[in-house]
Amino acid sequence: QQPVQSPQAVILREGEDAVINCSSSKALYSVHWYRQKHGEAPVFLMILLKGGEQKGHEKISASFNEKKQQSSLYLTASQLSYSGTYFCGTAATSGTYKYIFGTGTRLKVLA
Amino acid sequence: DVKVTQSSRYLVKRTGEKVFLECVQDMDHENMFWYRQDPGLGLRLIYFSYDVKMKEKGDIPEGYSVSREKKERFSLILESASTNQTSMYLCASSSTTDEQFFGPGTRLTVL
C-alpha cells in the first residue's frame, strides 16, 4: 500500500516555506525523499532512519515520526530551483532495497 | 559523474509487439530496478535485481519480465505490449539501501 503524500500540489512565492507530508499505514524503518524536475530523473535528497539518523546532501530538512509512521519534508526560504515533484519512498525493514513510493507532491515556486 | 542511461527517451509500439527497454549503469552497482510512473500513482516498482541473473518481483510485475545477464545492464521486456502499458518507465541502480540513482526515463506509447 502506497504511502499518502499531502498536499498533492502547492504553489509558493520565492522565499516562502512549505511542508510536504508522507504518511504510511505500516510501521516504517526508513523514509527516503526524492525530487524530480520536469523532464528529468528523480534525484535523491535524503534518507531518515528509525532511531533518528539522517543522511542527505541537500540544504533541506526533514523529520521522521516512527510512532505516527510519517515523515515531513521542510522547504524553507524556497528558491525557484525547488520546483518539481517530491516523492517519499518508504521501507518497512532494514536491509531492504524494495521501497514503496508515494504518489508525489507537485511544488511550483514563482518569482 | 555517475550515470544511468536508458536506450530510448521515447518509444512508440503497436499492441501485441514485443518491447525491450534497456538500462545501463556505469557505477558497478549490484542492485537495479525498473519502475513505471503514471500521473497520480507515483513510482511503482515492477522488478528489481540484486545480482546478475537474480531478480525479484516488485508490486506490479504482471505483463513484464526482466533480464540481467551482465552486472551493468538490466532489461525490461514486455512480451506482448498492451495499451495499458503506455507509461513512463524509469530505471534505477544502487549499491546500498540508501540512495538510488535514476535514469532519464523512457516514455512508451502503445497504440
Image (spheres, rainbow, N blue to C red):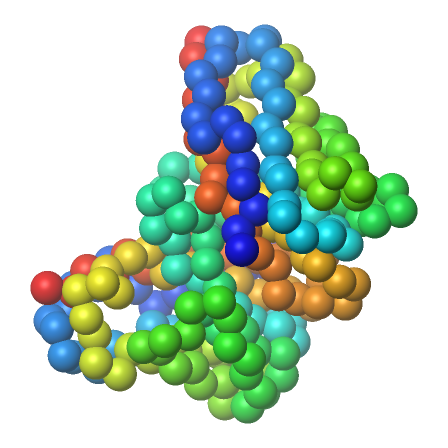
Of the pair B71 and A75, the residue shown nearer to us: A75
Q: Identify which residue is drawn at 19% across, 60% down.
A: B109
Where residue B96 appears, x then y in whole percent? Answer: 73, 65
The image shows residue A60 at horizontal and vertical percentages of: 69, 29
Residue found farthest to the right = A51
* Residue A95, placed above or below residue B65: above
- In the figure, residue B107 lies in which quadrant? bottom left
Q: Is residue B107 left or right of residue B101?
A: left
Q: Is residue A17 left or right of residue B37?
A: right
Position above or below: B40 against B76: above
Quadrant assignment, res B9: bottom left
Q: Look at the image and tell me in which quarter the N terminus of chain B lies.
A: bottom right
Q: Find residue A37 and report its image quarter.
A: top left
- A106 sits to left or right of A4: left
Query: Where residue B71 sits in the image (x, y, percent)?
Result: 57, 82
Q: Residue at the spot x=48%, y=67% of the render?
A: B59
A98 with respect to A64 (left or right): left
Q: Position of residue B6 (x, y in %)?
A: 39, 65
The residue positioned 33% from the left and 56% from the top of the image is B88
Residue A108 vertical placement versus A62 (above, below): above
Residue at the spot 79% in from the left edge and 43% down from the top edge = A66
